[in-house]
Amino acid sequence: MNFNHSQKIATAHAITDLLAAKEVDTRDDLHAWLDHQANRAALRTVKGVGPKSVDYISNLVGRSQVAVDVHLRTFAADAGVPHLCYEELRAVYEEAAAVIGHDQGGLEHAVWRYRSGAV
């Protein structure tokens, strides 16, 4: 990983330490561990880990989550969706995915690619 900030390195180490202490050793372990809200909350106690980080990590282990970032916020604002807290905006994207019959993580990725100019 190419982190350019010492706090990001410290966060990565803290996440690793937490997971090791909880005996989360594999991708499958992490996938199952994230089923429990208490574990997701424990991850949030790590300095530098917010709801987006937890959702992003969930995506990395095969869960389909919406990790709201600046690109998704901008897209929503451009679409006339008012400023919402993280959880509310994530719920809007989740509902939109359901309405159009699309995977949540796939919709998130498509919006991210569009807004980031990666398309």
Image (tube, helix red, strand yellow):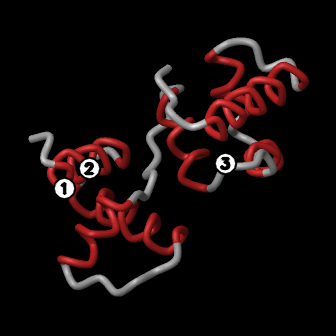
Question: Above or below — where is 72 with respect to 41?
Answer: below
Distance between mark 3 and mark 1 Cα atoms: 23 Å
Residue at the far top in the pictured view: 26
Residue at the far left in the pictured view: 119
x, y percentage for residue 68? 43, 58
| Of 95 and 4, the residue lying toward us | 4
Q: Which image quarter: residue 119?
A: top left
Q: Residue at x 51, y 29 (%)?
A: 3
| Of 46 and 101, the residue lying toward us | 46
- Label 2 amino acid? Trp
Distance between mark 3 and mark 2 Cα atoms: 20 Å
- Label 1 amino acid? Arg
- Mark on residue 115? 1
Distance between mark 2 and mark 1 Cα atoms: 5 Å
Q: Residue at x 36, y 61 (%)?
A: 70
Q: Which image quarter: residue 16?
A: top right
Give the left or right position of residue 119, taking residue 47 as reference: left
Tell whether label 1 touches label 2 (CB within 8 Å).
yes
The kind of secondary structure element at disc 1 is helix
x, y percentage for residue 84? 45, 81
- Label 3 amino acid? Val
Q: Residue at x 74, y 32 (%)?
A: 15
The kind of secondary structure element at disc 2 is helix
Residue holding disc 3? 49
- Mark on residue 112? 2
The kind of secondary structure element at disc 3 is loop
Q: Residues within 10 Å of mark 2 (few under 14, many from 20)?
A: many
Tell whether label 2 touches label 3 (CB within 8 Å).
no
